[in-house]
Amino acid sequence: HYSQRNQNYMIHGVTGPDEYENNVDNNWYTNLLAQWTLKYTLEILKEVSPEQAKQLNVSEDEKKHWQDIVDNMYLPYDKDLNIFVQHDGFLDKDLKPVSEIPADQLPLNQNWSWDKILRSPYIKQGDVLQGIWDFIDDFTPEQKKSNFDFYEQYTVHESSLSPAIYSVLAADLHYEDKAVELYERTARLDLDNYNNDTVDGLHITAMTGGWIAVVQGFAGMRVRDGKLHYAPFLPKKWSHYSFRQVFRDRLIEVDVDQDGSHFKLIDGEPITIDVAGKPVELSK
């Protein structure tokens, strides 16, 4: 809806990615994704054929309204902290870091009442940081750093979806020890039963998250303008890691050890990739 008082579009009464918050107003992630969806739709509409446009039956007034929402969406921000605010009122909570919670009270969802969790600042899984990960190249290093430094201290990672995303962002910020710590949390979630719920079954999302943390985090894989990029580094406590990846009908093997980074085209047509800003030709 449009707020006459603030001259912005707002979305009230939602649950964002953080499942320890519900019925909040102006969740930054939700507002950002709504804005992006309309922006993307308007871009795609410029590419459809006249026949397709006729079938879609989108009026010029609709497109103008969507553009107005894109231009005037409210995205909560605090200039003093230089952070995107998770939702209206988040900064009014009693902001104590997770490190102050007694160990015998974790995981929260098995020890606290639901109303106590809702009143707390504790984040079950990435919310603002999930949005930054979704569009990781759209934010400056300063934005990524200030938001990571702020929200990481309040995140309990009581979701198997959470630590891998934080690991990628930590690696992007060159927080090597934190990136490894969060990788180990996702890779060992069931082995170490961090959240006391392995009895319910394996967390397949955490297994996937381990792969994501290695590929996007330590190997720095990104796709930019249709081109494959890597910025690999080897954590100090590791001797080696490797993975295979399919990209546009090519099977590529990536090997990183103490001698450097090694790339091999296993299958498919030759391709040029970018490694730490330098073009590398791969062919069988």
Image (spheres, rainbow, N blue to C red):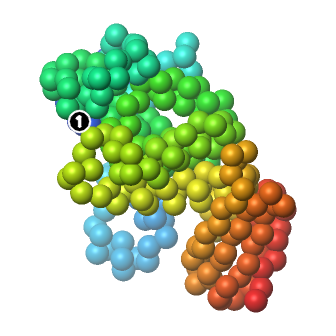
Measuring 26% from the left and 37% from the top, which residue is drawn there? 19
Using the image, determine if residue 63 lies above or below residue 97: below
Measuring 65% from the left and 77% from the top, which residue is drawn there? 252
Dividing the picture into quadrants, the one containing residue 124 is: top left
Dividing the picture into quadrants, the one containing residue 277 is: bottom right
Could you tell me residue 70's position as x and y percent?
43, 42
Q: Where is the C terminus found, in terms of image quarters?
A: bottom right
Q: Which residue is mark 1?
A: 14
> Which residue type does callout 1 highlight?
Val
Could you tell me residue 62's position as x and y percent?
31, 52
Indicate left or right for 11 with 44 as reference: left
In the image, 141 versus 177, the foreground residue is 177
Using the image, determine if residue 135 lies above or below residue 87: below
Measuring 81% from the left and 77% from the top, which residue is drawn there? 281
Dividing the picture into quadrants, the one containing residue 115 is: top left
**Disc 1 on helix, strand or loop?**
loop
Circle 1 packing at 10 Å, graded few (<14), some (14-19), many (20+), is some
Could you tell me residue 201's position as x and y percent?
24, 57
Q: Where is the N terminus found, in terms of image quarters?
A: top left
Indicate left or right for 230 with 146 as reference: right
Indicate left or right for 90 with 262 as reference: left
Using the image, determine if residue 16 lies above or below residue 280: above
Can you see residue 237? yes
In the image, 67 versus 159, the foreground residue is 159
Could you tell me residue 168's position as x and y percent?
56, 47
